Image (cartoon, helix red, strand yellow):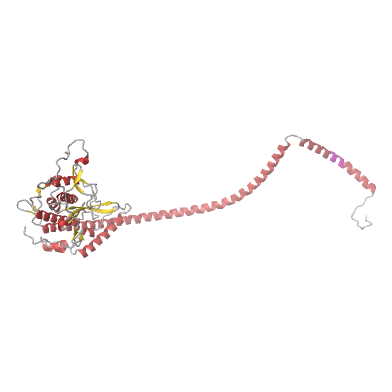
Amino acid sequence: MECEYCRTSSRKFLCSSCVSEKLQEFNAEIKPIVDEKNELIKQAEDYLQIKNTANLHLLLSERSRRERAVLTSTQQSRILERECGAVRQKVLQLRSQVERRRAALQSLKNNLKAQHAHRDLEHQKELAVAQKKWARMHKSMVTTRRVLVNELVSLFEIQYLEDKTLVICNVTIPNHLINVSKIDKTELNAAIGHVIHSTTLIARYLGVKLPFLLINNGRYSHARTTRWKDGKQTHSKMPLFLSDRNLRKFIVGMAMLSYDIAYLCYTQHVDVPLSQVTNVLQNLMQCCRAEHLGERSHTTLFRPVKDQSFSLDFNQVLRLTALRYRQEGTQILPTGLPDDRTEGQSSNDKHFYRVSSVEDHDGDDGRYRIGIAEGGRFQSSDDEDHTGFVDGRPDADNDENWNIVDLLPTYNDSDPDEDEEDLLKDTENGLMSFNLSASNLVPGVLGMMETLGSRGNDMSGIAYTFGLPTFGSRTSK
């Protein structure tokens, strides 16, 4: 059928009666559905009127949220699984690399152990050679020291006379009670001067540093102590030249000289009894004839003198020295002193020879004085002032041209981190420096044994080789 307006033949046209009939049939068909819809709506309205409807909505929304979270987690887990797979591959690669490096490290460690073992063996051989050289050098130095000391004894003519009196340059220091009023002071001062000179030379030859500095300067000879006060270095000088007015200070100076010689004997393993400590000439002779002379020194690394625990008390030496010297009309030892055996006395009261802590007000610039305390107070009746100046110039502490102590390597125990290899290297350098300095300053030191071998028993030329002073003509012994 064709439309009369659009002339389209594809459409189906119905008449009004047909449409009405079709509409009635449609309404009849849809009525049960509408009734069912209305029934469902009524049921839904009844269901929504229940009290737990709000909780149900919450649960439903929570389920939806969790479903979305599960979906997101699933996606992230898949991404992490892919990343973990890549990391596993990298871990496997690193493990294989670590195994290779461990194998290489073990190989290098084995090689290093072998090298260290070989190096340690070489070092032990070098150390043994160096120790042998060191021992030979020390033996040669000990021999040189003994030759120097023997030559000094020969030069100063330290010998025993027929009456068993020990003399030095034909003068002596009596080893008994000395009355300074009757003794020849010139001869005594000459003997003391020779003892001071020989002691300082022996200390230099042996490389021993004495507790008290000894200065040999004629009538200005003295023993010196050094101390610090208010950040300044000060000196206390005690005369070693006896005059008519300095007996008390002279006694202190002689005690310091006796203490120095006793310490010198101590370093050479010579035991000096306390009763003989004031016999300076005899003790000096024992030191020169010591069995282990020159083996230990303060200035060498090989077998140095490390033990400084010298047990001799200076107060005892001072007391024994004061007991030896007396003067007519002068009381050296006070009679009113407490006895050492008196109970209840302190240790300070028993020693009446002290170092006074009272400042000196007679122009010594606050220096502490060493003297004899009488009745608990410092007493000094000496009027002579030893200023230490000769001809307007200060006295020299060292009048020699060279000092064997200054040529030797100095022992230093202050560095705890210094290993054996560095110590050996420093020692070799120090010995090389000593050889060079000795060959330049003191020609003939290293070749002394050959010189002595050519001269036999005659050692008179050694004094001139080392620049030692001579004292007149030498008489035959």
Report x, y in % for residue 206. 19, 55
Q: Main secondary structure of the magenta part?
A: helix
Q: Position of residue 152 (x, y in %)?
A: 13, 58
Give above or below for 32 relative to 265.
above
Q: Is residue 209 magenta?
A: no
Residue closest to the far left: 162
Task: State whether residue 430 appears in this view.
Answer: yes
State the image coordinates of residue 366 (x, y, percent, origin top left): 25, 51
The stretch in magenta equals: 30-35
Q: Tag count in the figure?
A: 0
Image quarter in which the C terminus is found: bottom left
Judge from the rendering whether residue 70 lies leftward or rightward of residue 385; answer left or right.
Answer: right
- The foreground one among 233 and 465 is 233
Q: Residue at x 95, y 47 (%)?
A: 17
Identify which residue is drawn at 26% across, 59% down.
Answer: 430
Which quadrant: the N terminus?
bottom right
Q: Residue at x 37, y 55 (%)?
A: 112
Q: Quadrant of residue 2?
A: bottom right
Magenta-span inclusion, residue 34: yes
Q: Based on the displayed image, in which of its 4 quarters is residue 147 positioned? A: bottom left
Residue 306 higher or lower than 389, as above or below: above
- Foreground pick, 114 / 326: 326
110 on left or right of 96: left
Q: Nearer the viewer, residue 371 or 264?
A: 371
Whether residue 269 is visible: no
